Image (spheres, coloured by chain):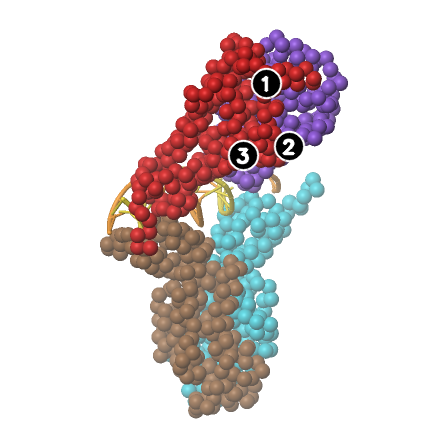
Chain colours: A cyan, B brown, C red, D purple, E orange, F yellow
Amino acid sequence: MTQPRKRNRAATTAGLLAAARARFALLGYDATNVRDIAQDAGVDATLIFRYFGSKQRLFEEALAPIDDQDDLPPDGEPEDIPTRLLHSTMRQDSVDHPLIALLRSSSREECRERLNTQLYDTYVRNLEGLLDQPDRELRAELLTAWLLGINVARTIAHTPALSNACVDDISPFFDQVTAVLLGSGSALKPAGAEQTAGTAADGQV
Amino acid sequence: MTQPRKRNRAATTAGLLAAARARFALLGYDATNVRDIAQDAGVDATLIFRYFGSKQRLFEEALAPIDDQDDLPPDGEPEDIPTRLLHSTMRQDSVDHPLIALLRSSSREECRERLNTQLYDTYVRNLEGLLDQPDRELRAELLTAWLLGINVARTIAHTPALSNACVDDISPFFDQVTAVLLGSGSALKPAGAEQTAGTAADGQV
Amino acid sequence: MTQPRKRNRAATTAGLLAAARARFALLGYDATNVRDIAQDAGVDATLIFRYFGSKQRLFEEALAPIDDQDDLPPDGEPEDIPTRLLHSTMRQDSVDHPLIALLRSSSREECRERLNTQLYDTYVRNLEGLLDQPDRELRAELLTAWLLGINVARTIAHTPALSNACVDDISPFFDQVTAVLLGSGSALKPAGAEQTAGTAADGQV
Amino acid sequence: MTQPRKRNRAATTAGLLAAARARFALLGYDATNVRDIAQDAGVDATLIFRYFGSKQRLFEEALAPIDDQDDLPPDGEPEDIPTRLLHSTMRQDSVDHPLIALLRSSSREECRERLNTQLYDTYVRNLEGLLDQPDRELRAELLTAWLLGINVARTIAHTPALSNACVDDISPFFDQVTAVLLGSGSALKPAGAEQTAGTAADGQV
DNA sequence: TATGAATGAGCATTCATTCAT
DNA sequence: GATGAATGAATGCTCATTCAT
């Protein structure tokens, strides 16, 4: 009680970051206030400024680590990329997906930019890399938009069916839509069996 | 606008509503302040309270009219519904789509509820009505999520390809994805050939 | 409906004054707003400024007429003065006694001055005139304070017994206290008999 | 006060309470604004909200301590009660008597209630306890009204004689009036001697 | 190092008052 | 003469941030 906390800078900043992540994702930047974050972390609000300088910087750092974790690692087969993005989208039961935090804070120009960047780096670029059609950017963005929309529907709008669905419920549809959007000439094509439907669809387009 | 538009209640309220619509959609509820809205409309901020009572009420009225306009009218063929929803999603060059305003204000419980309601009434319910599979709700929500994601990508994230795309660029993909998601047994089915792929895909799922 | 009111200046000002009197007495100057007064009178708030110039002037004029009516007329026997002041104090079932309005508005220097003046002109001066002792001013003020306190207790504090009391309930006490405060050497004294009771009462205590 | 009294919660809250007490008593609740209170106390206005939560709460706390101090302690002889109430009424040279603050804020329902309660608890109830006549409540209220009126005359109306009077100037009258109002059968009666003086005083006045 | 007292800018809202019709 | 649209000053209150200990 005299030493209320371990005076452990690492633990304090980690707790602050976690609390910030949760609040920013749930409420967005504006509606989140630093005192509540500090209270959630069980520390004094001043430490936010001591350790991070400003609310803005805390926001940036709170979103950064998960960004990296979300960036697709280069290992793994290319044809797994869509599936892995779906898993990333569906993975979070917790509401603190960084994309959602950015979306909810998108009244800030910098957040909009960052949302854009992150969407590109994590989704569009990776998907586009699988394709070689002239309209591959649009195709990649269309699939990205779908994943983004699913995320929003689940974490913000809370539409009932999607909120309760798990990856397996969605996979069948996802595979087909992926086949349609990534279409022929995609790197996925040679991968084979599960793409058959996609191939069929693609053939007719 | 060039003329100070003096002593005209109708024009003043209309200007206030337009300015509010734009600011709320761009910045969300919290980040929007009444003085800026009034300044955009070229009038004194107190008129907001005179005519609307509160910022909250202004928000509601600013979003209301477009809501109605977005609700699908019951006329028209059922199989046109997805296409019409796509047009509604793509129609707005202006950023002030009410769905976006609600999304950006989603830190407020009431806005989340309203977003949910509006998503259901305008999208999910109408799409679900076309289907009879046991999983028709999930299918409808998946298509809704896509339209929502496209909207977000265009108006908030400003992804380049989607932002510059027009309905015709997207229609081919949209038709196929619709076929996949609404699948067999849908009211769309008898409409024809392009559903074949969908049916095939559906069969294999 | 096309001619909503008789456009009768006299009636309008009278209605405004009456409404103002009631509101000012009930709420004091600050807590009363001109729109409510106008609404009570059934006219537009602007007329207050047209006819009275300002809220302040309306206040002054609203309190003025009753002032005069409360000033003791010079006719009548001097020994009736205390009794008449008691009746004035007890008379008002309605809450709009001007003294109360002034008291409730006494945060304004001008109202305090006016309260002082009115208390002096209506009460102290008249009572003091009945006396010739060196401490006649203090005696007069002590009786004035009592009448004032009774008024406050009835109209503001709403103490139960005093609120429900009528003049006859209080008269016996009043006569004795008057006898004590105005005391011997007062102009009342030679008047005689009813003071005896006071002395008797005093004796029995 | 000369020294900025920095970083001292106790001193700051005390200063704020004192400043609030003075302003509320002088101006009433509505006419007092928090910025002025803070300026009087030499601190920033936001500290009012930090320490008290709201203007309303500050008002309550500013009036509370004096309330307690004014409540008659149960010790002491019952027959001293009237005298002690007189002293309490006359004691305050400072204008910040809580009764006056309440009176000046009486446009607020809650203040009216509290005024009523306080008047009853501090004055009426204690006086009534000395009596056993059927009309003891009225008698107690009449004496209460007088003390209240004296307070108002001194602190609000500033009538000259009462404002400059001290307890000793008023005591002779007070004893006689008390004798009249509390009358025969009062608990004061057996106390005896000092009432005789009242009678004597009456005779000699 | 960490605590909490202090601060100033900003917000929604109200009100008396003026101006144009 | 009378209506209601327009205005600017002020108020209670919140928040990120800094300063002193």
Q: Quadrant of residue B194?
A: bottom left
Q: Is residue D78 above or below residue C14?
A: above
Disc 2 target residue: D120
Label 3 or label 2, whichever lies nearer to me, is 3
At label 2, which amino acid type do we have? Tyr
Name the side, left or right, on which C30 lies relative to D59. left
* Label 2 residue SS: helix
From the top left corner, tell me how far across and down residue C87 is, in percent. Answer: 52, 28
Which mark lies nearer to you, 1 or 3?
Answer: 1
Q: Which residue is mark 3?
A: C155
Amino acid type of the residue that numbered disc 3 sits on in the rendered structure: Thr
Q: Quadrant of the C terminus of chain D?
A: top right
Asked if badge 2 and badge 1 are on a common chain, one would say: no
Foreground tag (2 vs 1): 1
Which residue is painted at 54% across and 34% down in the image? Answer: C156
User: On what subunit does the disc labeled 2 rest?
Assistant: D
Q: Which residue is mark 1?
A: C194
Q: Nearer the viewer, residue A188 or E7?
A: E7
The image position of residue D77, as x and y in percent, is 74, 21
**Amino acid at the residue labelled 1:** Glu
Is there CB contact under 8 Å for labels 3 and 2? Answer: no
* Left or right for D200, reference B32: right
Q: Is residue C137 visible?
A: yes
Which comes sooner in the sequence, label 1 or label 3? 3
Does D158 appear above or below B29?
A: above
Residue under the image location 52 percent in, 36 percent down = C93
Task: Give the CA distance from mark 1 to mark 3.
Answer: 29 Å
Near-viewer residue (A194 or C10)? C10
Looking at this rendering, what residue extends furthest in the front direction?
C193
